[in-house]
Amino acid sequence: MTAIHLENLVKRFGAFTALKTMDLEIRDGEFMALLGPSGCGKSTTMNMIAGMEQPSEGRITFDGRDMNGVAIGRRGVGFVFQNYAIFTHMNVYDNLAYGLKVRGTPASEIDRRVKAMADFLQLTPMLDKPSAKLSVNILQRLAIGRSAIVEPAIFLLDEPLSNVDAAFRAVMRTELKHLQRQFRQTMVYVTHDQLEAMTMADRIAVMDHGVLQQVGTPLEVYNDPVNLFVADFIGSPGMNLLKGTLADSDRGLVVDLGMLGVTAPLDPALSAIARVNRVREVVYGFRPERVVPAAAGQGLAIPVTFIERIGARTVVHFGDREQRVKAVFDNDVAVQAGETVHVAVEPGFARLFDAATGVAIREV
Amino acid sequence: MNRSLPFEIFRYGAILLALAVTLIPTLWMASMAFKPIAEWSAAGADLTWWPKSPTLDNFRFIFGTSTSDLIVALDRTAGKPILASLLSAVFGTLIAMTAGTAGAYGLSRFGSGQNLPLALIQLRLFPPMAVMIPVMIMWAFFGLVDTWWGLALIYGIVTLPFAFWLMKTFFDDMPREIEDAALVEGCSRLRVFMKITLPMMRPALASSALFVFILNWSDYLIALLLTTREWVTIPVYMASLSSSMTGQLYGAKAALGLIAAVPPVIMGIAIQKHLVRGLTFGALKQ
């Protein structure tokens, strides 16, 4: 229930700059995911919001209040750690009660809230158990419960699901979202798993090498990545990115992909922007889900390298080295490795990037 | 596990040898403690493993209540040396563990570099004799010679590096996130240390304390130099158990040795469950 504002945030560790610059507004009650590969600065950002690290430059405000110099325990944040950080010398009940006890909550109130939280997280049967011998899945829920029970205005989660098994991760994704809807906290969620970010977050902040790349709703970053890094990082499999040259044809502006042939004409809007930008060397991007079979002699003709069946869908890999393309088709698609298939990109779903800078060519 | 026969013979041979080297002298001592003088002295020609006529006379002798024909006048009994050893070793261990734990926590969490920790281990690089003469002079100046508290103080100082290094390793291994989790909830540093860190470190504290205690308990040299009469410890007192008539009083020494083995054994049993490390960190995905 607090808006977080990061202004010109910089963090250096000695000669190493973990966070080059960061400006981000996290709205009141928003679920914001900080997404990026390891070493991108997302955990450093989170630790500064919590107060475990002090910014080298810039400032952090909660609802306009400057947090610089405010002690870690006085910021009203809850923090769930990647390794859970359970107090193993206490049982489950005492772990859940800890935050309330520190705040001097009356015993009857503690008891009521611990039982309610245990009920919510299905921890009731384990309340008396020593926490040292619980399974990873239960520890993870306990860690979330211990932070959530004090109903912090800001809830920070640092890769909480990276150690649990895949099936449980899917369950927790819905539970976490449910938890946030119930308590309406401002939630900041650090992850390197784009699926977690896509499924839970209201908005995603994509980071790389200490620089914020793009902020937007899951669909915005998915559909309209601002640069090649975001295009490649978001989505599984990521966006197809093919080097090419812009060329004029009698049907409009197209991208010459060399060996693969020439693309269908670009949208009028995209063509117009591309012409204004005067870029010739581009990267042509399109989502594997937007690849459709084309009639013989049309679209791009590329050989199928191998076929990956993932159940509901089938991922077909085309081409090799520089000119690799993935396409997601229905699971009964009739293609075979070795044959050459004609494919096209659905109209309106092609994206262009400047090959030199990696920046998306699009309306701003 | 298909080891060859010669290897198995070698393996068990080595184990038996190691056991023999450690156990036979101990068992011999235990047996001797219950032998009458005729069986342990040079006069008793036939040495046997098992006491032929077991007696508690050696124990009575060192506590001054012997009624046997062992005609040696003891100028003092073992009571006071046992007390001296207990007091100096226990308080020495307390000093070393308190200072060592506090220092180790501070340097593990807030320290930088290796200079300070290494400087502490330097204390142990000296041969003890090199520093004992200055220590004697200092202790004499402060009136600490021949007192249990003077002995406890030097024991605390001498074993501090061990306590410090053992505890520092344990603190370094403890994930910081556990303390951060308590700090986020609004705990003060001190409260985190007292309520979270120390309780989780119980196994580490127990095993380090046992190690330090055994070092203090078995010291001979320092006690020999720093005590004269009132507060001599068990090892020093044991060395004095001899007479011009019979030479070394092996029976009495054995009885005292057996008594001296009791405290470390009791401590070891008491903290047995803590000696197996890893309980503390079991809940963390490493």
Image (cartoon, rainbow, N blue to C red):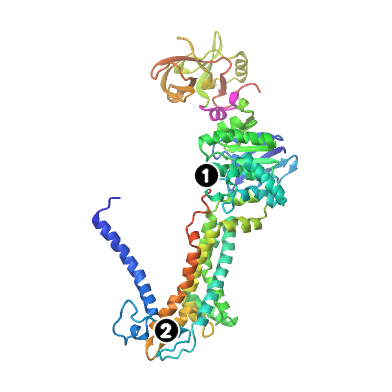
* x then y, percent, for residue A117: 65, 42
Say above or below: B170 vs A175.
below
Indicate the quadrant where residue A76 lies. Answer: top right
Magenta region includes residue A231: yes
Labels 2 and 1 share a subunit = no
Q: Residue A161 versus residue B262: which sits nearer the camera? A: B262
- The residue lying at 41 percent from left, 15 percent from top is A340
Say above or below: B5 vs A144.
below
Q: Which residue is mark 2?
A: B57
* x then y, percent, for residue B20: 33, 69
Residue that lies at the very extreme toward the top in this rendered image: A250
Say above or below: A128 vs A175.
below
Cβ atoms at labels 2 and 1 below 8 Å apart: no
* Distance Cα–Cα, label 2 vs label 1: 58 Å
Does the rendering let one see residue B122?
Answer: no
Q: Label 2 neighbourhood size at 10 Å, few (<14), some (14-19), many (20+)? A: many
Residue at disc 1, secondary structure: loop
What segment is highlighted magenta in the picture?
A: A222-237
Q: Residue B277 versus residue A79: which sits nearer the camera? A: B277
Question: At label 2, which amino acid type do we have?
Answer: Asp
